[in-house]
Amino acid sequence: MTQPKNSRLVTELEEATNAYGRTIYVEKREEVTRKPKIWYEYNRQQILMKYDRRPTGVFVTKMGKTRYVKA
């Protein structure tokens, strides 16, 4: 699989563990609380999911069966 332009591997991001003991990849953290603001996680079907923490809640985007995120 060739790497798409303007993208990088999700494994190049900061690796952390969520409250359920699953591996997440953190792109950005909140400045005050240091909680993940934007992070990625593979679900049980190995589909990459993007999570975006906003003032009104966490928004989830299905990225698909890929290893790349936009830079």
Image (cartoon, rainbow, N blue to C red):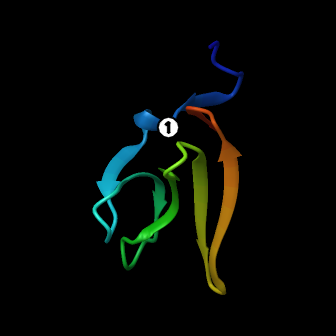
Q: Position of residue 23 (x, y in %)?
A: 35, 52
- Quarter-wise, where is residue 52 in the image? bottom right
- Quadrant of the frame with the C terminus: top right
Task: Check disc 1 and report its element: helix, strand or loop.
Answer: helix
Q: Residues within 10 Å of mark 1 (few under 14, many from 20)?
A: many
Q: Position of residue 12 (x, y in %)?
A: 42, 34
Amino acid at circle 1: Val
Front-lying residue, 54 or 31: 54
In the image, residue 26 above or below residue 8: below
Q: Position of residue 38 (x, y in %)?
A: 54, 60
Q: Determine whether, in the image, residue 49 is placed left or right of residue 25.
A: right
Residue most toward the top? 2
Front-lying residue, 17 or 29: 17
In the image, residue 55 above or below residue 63: below
The residue drawn where x is 37% and y is 79% is 33
Task: Read off the residue under disc 1.
Answer: 10
Q: Determine whether, in the image, residue 69 is placed left or right of residue 31.
A: right
Residue most toward the bottom? 56
- Quadrant of the frame with the N terminus: top right
The residue drawn where x is 46% and y is 71% is 30
Q: Determine whether, in the image, residue 40 is placed left or right of residue 18.
A: right
The residue drawn where x is 55% and y is 46% is 45
Residue most toward the front? 45
- Quarter-wise, where is residue 18 in the image? bottom left
The residue drawn where x is 33% and y is 47% is 15
Q: Position of residue 54 (x, y in %)?
A: 62, 77
